[in-house]
Amino acid sequence: RTELTRDVVIVGAGAAGLTAANELRRAGLSVAVLEARDRVGGRLWTDVIDGAMLEIGGQWVSPDQDALIDTVAELGLETYSRYREGDSVYVGPDGTTHRFTGEMFPVAPETERVIAEITERLDAMVAEIDPDRPWAHEKAEEWDRISWDAWLRAQTDDDEAVRNLAFATGSAMLTKPTHTFSLLQSLLMAASAGSYSNLVDADFILDKRVVGGLQQVPLLLAERLGDDVHLGRPVRTLEWSGDGVTAIADGMTVRARFAILALAPVLYNRISFVPALPRLQHQMHQHLSMGFVIKVHAVYDTPFWREKGLSGTAFSPYELSHEAYDNTNHGDARGTLVGFVSDQHADDVFRLSAQERKDRILESLSHYYGPEAKEPVVYYESDWGSEEWTRGAYAASFDLGGLHRYGAQLREAVGPVHFACSDMAGAGYQHVDGAIRMGRLAASQIVDEARA
Ligand code: FAD
């Protein structure tokens, strides 16, 4: 068993943990990062599958994500824009495929008017919310009591409008059924990206990618830390007191003054805390759960949809894959599509055989792009639900009523134990940008305490 003594032990080598570790080292503190997996990056994972480079986890960078943009630039990485020339595609309630340009789906004029009006109302509400403190809004409790679905249905009885408005924060972001989370949680999701309209605008929220893959961010951050990153070291026990912490991982023990738990909050209960965490944390952490989405990658010999004048951008609240995009790699002659299958749809297709699931998903993509979509040369499903050290995708959110009740305490340290993860971010919530922000915040709190 290896025994180490450091100023700070960091549990988890994702974007949050590695950012914190680098900040702490820069401030002159010694660190050890303990990572359960045999790789760094957590939910960032770029790999070659059957000869195709795929972004199995997070990949997109949007223009408001300063923390990520700064990190990408500082690490010397290049970005490129998602392909978006040509028409987008929308499949309506009767299964008809429509081509369109701009942000508004090609729906009936009355439905369009309703969507525009409610979007305006949502933007006004979101503008009043501080993403770092959504619980501080005077209507926080009221907005946290009602589900996103129920609130939308109270605004209009136009079902197509409701479905189109719902999925921007539902299937596409929190990846939970829209009756399971609150209006406030939905407003936070939108506020974390600047506005509800930004979230709906694929050209904004899915703007750029990193040449060579976004996992290079954690890989390069880890490289700077050298021997201070320890792979294959799941932390099983964390002893803590006013004097410091002892993290006991497989084959390694680290004693330190402070700890940062930089893992998804749904996994805190995998660690035995000695003494137990306070009752507030016990309760609060049970009200957070992971969303669930399958990211589907389909690679073709050519980006055939471009020849048809299609951008690759496709949406439909009626399709198994509710959204899909051109995800061709930088400089690649082959074409890649990425589609997403969310929440209950994901449950449903995981009950099928792998072949049936693939057939169903490719059938859905063919409704957007034509029959050629059914014949990819490489096909892969990112299945984060079965990853022991993540357990869902993209991130965690509160159940109904949880955000105003507990949100303010989520980032609060317990004695020497600090918490950092994208799943507790305000700006950049559920995104790599938020993970970096939370890593910086935990590090700065510890630097202040260490100097006090
Ligand atoms: P994680 O990446 O989850 O890191 C936590 C680390 O802790 C992991 O490495 C884990 O193995 C480790 N760990 C857990 N338990 C223990 C333990 N007991 N001991 C030691 N180590 C432990 N974000 C974007 O910005 N843009 C996108 O396009 C985007 N798309 C996404 C697509 C998918 C399919 C997924 C899954 C996520 C996506 N995200 C995207 C979200 C983004 O990837 C995450 O928000 C972010 O990477 C989380 O970083 P983190 O450091 O907070 O947590």
Image (cartoon, rainbow, N blue to C red):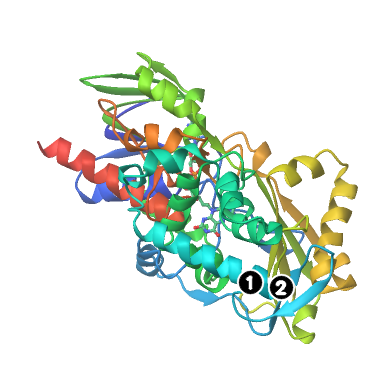
Q: Residue at x 19, y 46 (%)?
A: 28
Question: Picture coordinates of residue 279 (x, y %)?
Answer: 37, 17
Choose top left, top right, bottom left or bottom right for residue 126.
bottom left
Give the residue at mark 2. 108
Label 1 with label 2: CB-CB less than 8 Å: yes
Q: Quick one: SS at disc 2? A: loop
Q: Residue at x 38, y 32 (%)?
A: 406
Q: In the figure, is residue 12 to the left or right of 437?
A: right
Disc 2 Cβ-to-ligand 1 distance below 8 Å? no
- Identify which amino acid the numbered label 1 is placed on: Glu
Q: In the figure, is residue 92 to the left or right of 290?
A: right
User: Is the residue 130 above or below the residue 413 in the image?
Assistant: below
User: Is the residue 216 above or below the residue 240 in the image?
Assistant: below
Question: Picture coordinates of residue 212 (x, y %)?
Answer: 56, 67
Choose top left, top right, bottom left or bottom right for residue 331.
bottom right
Disc marking residue 112: 1
What count of labels does the image hold? 2
Q: Residue furthest top?
A: 275
- Identify which amino acid the numbered label 2 is placed on: Ala
